Amino acid sequence: MSEGQQKILVTGGRGQLAGAIVDEYTRDADVRAYGRADLDIADYDAVMTRVQADRPDVIINCAAYTNVDRAEDEPDVALNANAFGVRVLARAAQESGATLVHYSTDFVFDGHTTRPYGEADKTNPQSVYAQSKLLGEWFALDAPRGFVLRVESLFGGPAAKSSIDRIVQALTEGREAVVFSDRMVSPSYVVDVAAATRTLVDRGDAGLYHCVGSGYATWYDVAVEIARVMGKEREARLRPMSVREVSMRAPRPQFAALANDKLQRVVPVPTWQDAVRRYITAC
């Protein structure tokens, strides 16, 4: 490590977003990434010991429980990972003087709207998972310098298994891709989220931001764009489906798009179409 090099501690270090965060910082920072087996963020003593040893300037929390339906049966597990573990990290950040970055979700809203949500809009979580994520936001913002970045519809990364990857795979194999025609989203490329995270930490004021790709669309519109980028407009087999046709135990917000105007005042964020093009081109 070079003298004066920034020290970054990443939790949830084996995940999709964490991989992009590590890639973003590794070239000129001292990055320590810890997976769930290495560091349970709900373990107060383990977190305090690790933070005292690493002395990070920034703690970036990518750890999360993301099985939305299973959380209905495992509320304690979801709360530990998404809320109480965040409270531990906020305490560690307070005691060490580190900046804390925590990622949240569009699920904190109920989806009963016709326009993208802004940071000032009222939350109304509809599931155990969503409630646990909202509670985590509150804990993270208790840190002396805490950032909460709401993300959604993430794609990209070396081990990606996103909705966009499933659409790409179906088109590549000539299979039918079934996509929602009435669920509105703001697809977000993990590379762009990582770059925006770094700029916010370096230049922005602490607080809540919507860290998503610019613009929004239905999943059907996204699939059409993917087919265009892949040069498969004519042979693409896209079947639109309504959210009402799918039975899911935990409700999802139907209009889930987020407005990133506040973020854009600090760092320009590419459109989701540009991000999809770059991702598919790089694959």
Image: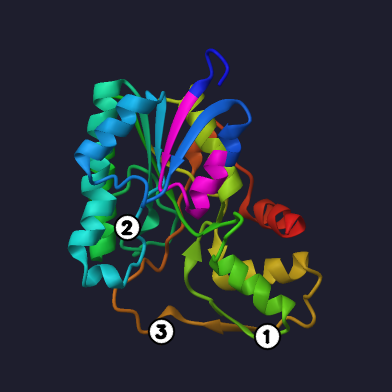
Q: Up-down: is 224 above or below 277?
A: below
User: In this view, which residue lies farthest toward the left?
Assistant: 76
Up-down: is 44 above or below 104? above
Q: Does residue 118 appear anywhere in the picture?
A: yes
Q: Name the residue carrying label 1.
A: 175
In the displayed structure image, the side of residue 8 where residue 157 appears, left or right: right
* Rendering coords of residue 2 (x, y %): 58, 17
Mark 3: few, some, or many residues within 10 Å (few <14, many ≥20)? few
Mark 3 or 2: in front is 3
Q: Residue at x 76, y 57 (%)?
A: 281
Residue to which mark 3 is pinned: 246
Spatial separation of the CA atoms under disc 3 and disc 1:
20 Å
* Residue 266 in sight from this viewpoint: no
Q: Tell me where residue 265 appears, x and y as whole percent.
A: 52, 31
Residue type at mark 1 is Arg
In the image shown, does 226 or 4 lie closer to the viewer? 4
**Residue depth check, mark 1 versus mark 2: number of the one nearer the observer:** 1
Label 2: few (<14), some (14–19) or many (≥20) C-alpha neighbours in 10 Å: many
User: Mark 2 — residue?
Assistant: 109
> For the residue labelled by badge 3, is the local secondary structure a helix, a strand or a loop?
loop
- In the rendered structure, are the residues bearing label 1 and label 2 in contact, judged by CB atoms less than 8 Å apart? no
- Say whether residue 221 is magenta: no
User: Which is closer to the viewer, label 3 or label 1?
Assistant: 1
Local crowd at mark 1 within 10 Å, few (<14), some, or many (≥20)? some
**Relative height, residue 121 to residue 217 (above, below):** above
Question: What stretch of residues is rendered in magenta?
Answer: 7-22
Which mark sits nearer the N-terminus, 3 or 1? 1
